[in-house]
Amino acid sequence: MPYVLAIDAGTTSCRTLLFDEKLQVAGLAQEEFRQYFPQPGWVEHDAEEIFETQYRTLLKVLDKTSVPLEEIVAAGITNQRETVVIWNRHSGKPIYPAIVWQDKRTESACKHLRQEHPGIRQKTGLVVDAYFSATKINWILEHVPGARDAADSGDLLCGTIDTWLIWKLTAGAVHATDHSNASRTMLYDLQATGWDPELLGLFGIPAAMMPEIRDSDGFFGNIVLGENKIPIRGVAGDQQAALYGQGCHSAGQAKNTYGTGCFLLLHIGEQAHITDNGLLTTVAWKLDGTISYALEGSVFQAGSVIQWLRDGLGLLESAEESAKMAAALSDNGGVYLVPAFTGLGAPYWDPDARGMICGLTRGTDRRHVVRAALESIAYQSADILRTMEAAAGIPLSELRTDGGATGNNWLMQFQSDIIQKPVLIAGIQESTALGAAMLATRHDNAFQQTRSAHQRVCKPVMSASDSTSLYAGWLAAVKRASS
Ligand code: ADP
């Protein structure tokens, strides 16, 4: 029976999953690795430690499942995006710790770039931010003694975590990335679908350092395990892999991951629309030479609002309790909670807005506040989906969901009511790894490619007019919370 490995290199842990031909999970191993915070705003990883941790989980899953190596016909890689590693091509040693996507050390450089180079947004689809790889690579070349000279003489290689793992797993044979990861570097031209010489020049990055960009379902070399070789046949960044794993393979399909925050991606087809409201345009994947794009937006405060009710206000014992409390009320009593703890993101972009609970009456009790918090997760997601639909001119057919908070049935039903579209809830929490496994076996008929990852569907039961008036109440509350 054929199997496929999914190598999932996350921000705090590495996981390796083994999927069978029906794309069911046959085994999983996971291990956390260290986070380094050398200065305020800085976040680093040890790239060697990431590889070793990842490799241990790979061996562990093989050991646990006892599947013969010759039955593992392919491997897919999915990874935390934007984080960069620079290493010496001869020694294989990183010259500096990996600078993680969360790292803000290049923020002031980005502020300057935003003013001086407005064209970057149009070319890359990204908002100029320290988040993306380009300024991090530049920082290492500028600050590590000898790095600039070594780069100029062709001794250094650079990559995101996918590239680093591919290089290590193939014993230095392949230095490559895929289009989805490349599009997060701020060095990639969305239209030309390649590294942009002008941007490489602007950030002082020699082209020879950069990995070759391959299709997301391309061949990325072999993982050599003793006598056996496992070909790496699929690579995508984590959010794009989740979009693929959720089966959002055509324009108009979207997924939302409900965790601490929410990550929304809408597949927009083969044309890259750049929006003027701060949503990111990104490559979803390139398959068999055909590129697909996605709009990406995030809700900063989602599950974290429930954590705040539990830990900050003491209104809840557990996150799970929130569903029952919300369901105990027949309506929201006019209470709205705007969780603008750190300002408002897309589509409002108001960094000075602050959180607010409004509509309180003498009849309000803690259940109203809990319900308002859950509702806010759905309203914020609806805000982004509406903005995406309008920007792309593509109506959304349904919303596919995953992540920890999808365990809340009340929230999922409310989400469906507010967007007035079906919400399909993943039965598997591993959409990201599933996406990597699906990409890696796309061309292999032995694997089922139509596996429905969805366990439950919520269809709208609320009338359109009730939904519209609730949403209008949210928009009014947001206005009051604005600066
Ligand atoms: P992350 O990957 O961001 O750590 P998870 O996918 O593990 O997040 O989801 C955890 C988040 O989801 C927490 O913020 C938690 O408050 C929220 N959450 C978990 N279960 C529920 C629930 N039943 N109702 C509402 N929120 C929940």
Image: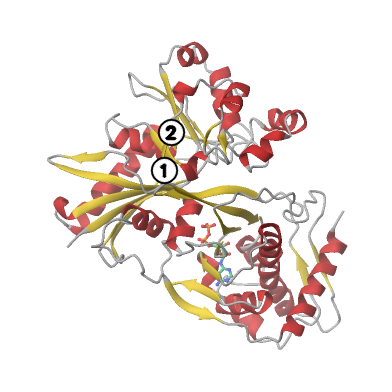
Q: Position of residue 98 (x, y in %)?
A: 48, 32
- Specify few, some or many for label 2: CA neighbours under 10 Å numbering under 14, 14-19, or 20 or more: some
At mark 2, the secondary structure is loop
- How far apart, in angstroms, are the residues tagged by discs 1 and 2? 9 Å
Q: Position of residue 447 (x, y in %)?
A: 27, 63
Picture quarter with the N terminus: bottom left
Numbered circles on residues, count: 2
Q: Residue furthest bottom?
A: 330
Q: Quadrant of residue 328?
A: bottom right
Do the residues bearing badges 1 and 2 touch, measured as CB atoms within 8 Å? yes
Q: Quadrant of residue 218?
A: top left
Q: Which mark is residue 46?
A: 2
- Between 145 and 456, the one lying in front of the other is 456
Residue 145 seen anywhere in this rendered image of the structure: no
Mark 2 sits near ligand 1, with its Cβ under 8 Å away: no
Is residue 461 rendered to the left or right of residue 86? Answer: right
Q: At x 73% / y 53%, what residue is drawn? A: 345
List the residue tagged with mark 1.
33
- Between 291 and 18, the one lying in front of the other is 291
Q: At x 60% / y 27%, what residue is drawn? A: 199
Q: Amino acid at mark 2?
A: Asp
Q: Position of residue 313 (x, y in %)?
A: 70, 66
Residue 91 seen anywhere in this rendered image of the structure: yes
Q: Amino acid at mark 1?
A: Phe
Q: Position of residue 190 (x, y in %)?
A: 57, 41
Give the answer, above or below, for where 464 lies relative to 185.
Answer: below
Q: At x 81% / y 73%, what residue is drawn? A: 472
Name the N-terminal-most of marks 1 and 2.
1
